[in-house]
Amino acid sequence: MTERYKSDESKVIDLKTNRESTEVREKLENTEKGKRSRITLALITVILLLTLCVISGSLVAFLRNLSILIVAFYCVYLARHLSFAWAALAVRWRPSELVTDLPAKLPRVTILVAAHNEDRVIERLVRALMNLNYPEDLREVIVVDDASTDSTPAILERLRKEHPSLRVIRRTEEERRKTPGKPAALNRGLLEATGEIVVVYDADHIPDRNAVMRLVMHFADPKVGAVMGRCKIMNRDENILTKLVYIDYLSGYLVNEYGREAFYSLPAFGGSNCAIRRSILETYGGFNERSVTEDTDITTRLILDGYRVVYDREALSIEEAPNRLTRFIRQRYRWAFGHQHVFYDYWLETLKSRHLRMVDKIELLLFLFLYHAPVVMFVGLILGFLWALGLFIPTSVPLAWLLWTLLFLGPFLEIGAGVIAEWREGEEPPNPGYLILFIPLFFISIFICTKAFIDGLVYPLIGRKYIWVKTPRREI
């Protein structure tokens, strides 16, 4: 690294030492809070189930009453799906003029990228970042090479020589073994960040030239703590799976994310194509290295601390979809495992929050519980099969059919609304016939989330820890 862009080594060491001592205290406090929260949740669940058993009086009656509760649960999420779908279809998007929305003074921005064995994609991302529509003297790009063993280091060194403003930090294998995962790599880069705003991109992304400018402009409002842009799949036509993931992203970003913004001003802060104030990150001790979904963790902490999270659908970045089922399962398992544990950590704090409205608390809890919903669906599937086998009779046959209908209706509403929203934008969405293939994908997701839930219960008992697992990139 050239002398011009080297940080003062003693300053970095002091920052690292101070942050590590702060993190030790915070981890101990958060671990104790998490334990109390999980124990409380477990006790409440056991008490509710025991109460239902006593009220029911028999196993058959218990199963009937449980099916009624599951239908009620589905209805709550159905109402949520309906409201988000309505919000997406009720608005006709018009691209806004970027220049009229710019703040008077642009802040300095640090773009962080964590890269472990990313030789297939890292060069195109770096070149896109160097071509952004943002003043060069107000941006720095820091790529943290997380002990890569492929040609990533050589590619980054070549790019650094071409672009002197690019900074490359290398974590050793020992550092990676000690603190594995993307959050730890980002925190290493954060130690040397100088920007007022921190923007994060995954290595497989290609941001639009105006993406960072659109993210940053929202920070003119001092109440805004973080901003999320829209992510879109670049390889949708590669195979059937990538087409389905593409449609899933339409639902996630054109319907779900926008619905949470429109109704509650509570969109989620994602893990890429997103921006956050560096001062907030430093207050939090950086990204949560205990979490495998650090983005959900930060979303929840920001909301609980009273900051606004903003979603800007015009801050666009394209990314890769998993092109193999094994990669898809690996990715969604991590999402489910991490998201479920964020719920365990913060559900009690959400209920105790004094500045959130009751409707906001309900929405935040529904968002955090999202990856438990397939677990409830799994229980519903078991009840449905028991009924089909004649082992128990539901309160009414229509109730059983309602249970099965609601199992798929809510998600299909959002997916269909996403396809329509894409079509209304003038884009050509995939053939609607692919929607039928979401049924087997739903079943796969149900089993992924159920396994993550069971593993989350078992791992602490056997002393096993789940660590960050990167989704392999497709062959180019």
Image (cartoon, rainbow, N blue to C red):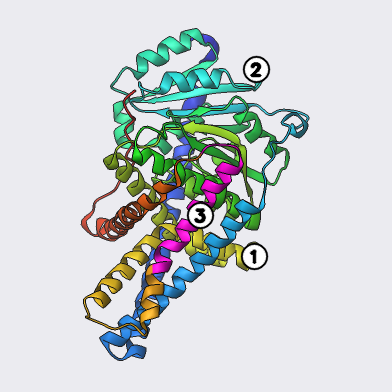
At mark 2, the secondary structure is helix
At mark 1, the secondary structure is loop
Residue 212 magenta: no
Residue nearest the observer in this picture, 445 or 216 = 445
Q: The C terminus is located in which quarter?
A: top left
Q: Residue at x 46, y 57 (%)?
A: 412
Please state the horizontal and vertical placement of residue 24, each as a whole percent of the image: 42, 45
Q: Residue at x 40, y 44 (%)?
A: 244
Q: Earlier in the sequence, mark 2 or mark 1?
A: 2
Residue nearest the observer in this picture, 335 or 2 = 335
Q: Earlier in the sequence, mark 1 or mark 3?
A: 1
| Residue indicated by mark 1 | 357
Measured Cα–Cα span from mark 1 to mark 3: 25 Å
Measured Cα–Cα span from mark 3 to mark 2: 42 Å
Quadrant of the rendered image containing residue 472:
top left
Q: Earlier in the sequence, mark 3 or mark 2?
A: 2
Q: In the picture shown, does residue 442 fall above or below 427?
A: below
| Residue indicated by mark 3 | 414
Residue nearest the observer in this picture, 306 or 390 = 390
Q: What's the amino acid at mark 1?
A: Arg
| Residue indicated by mark 2 | 137
Q: Residues within 10 Å of mark 1 (few under 14, many from 20)?
A: few
Q: Is residue 456 left or right of residue 85?
A: left
Q: Which residues are magenta?
A: 405-428
Q: Is residue 235 visible?
A: yes
Q: What's the amino acid at mark 3?
A: Glu
Q: In the picture shown, does residue 183 fall above or below 109?
A: below
Quadrant of the rendered image containing residue 277:
top right
Q: Residues within 10 Å of mark 3 (few under 14, many from 20)?
A: many
Q: Is residue 80 left or right of residue 151?
A: right
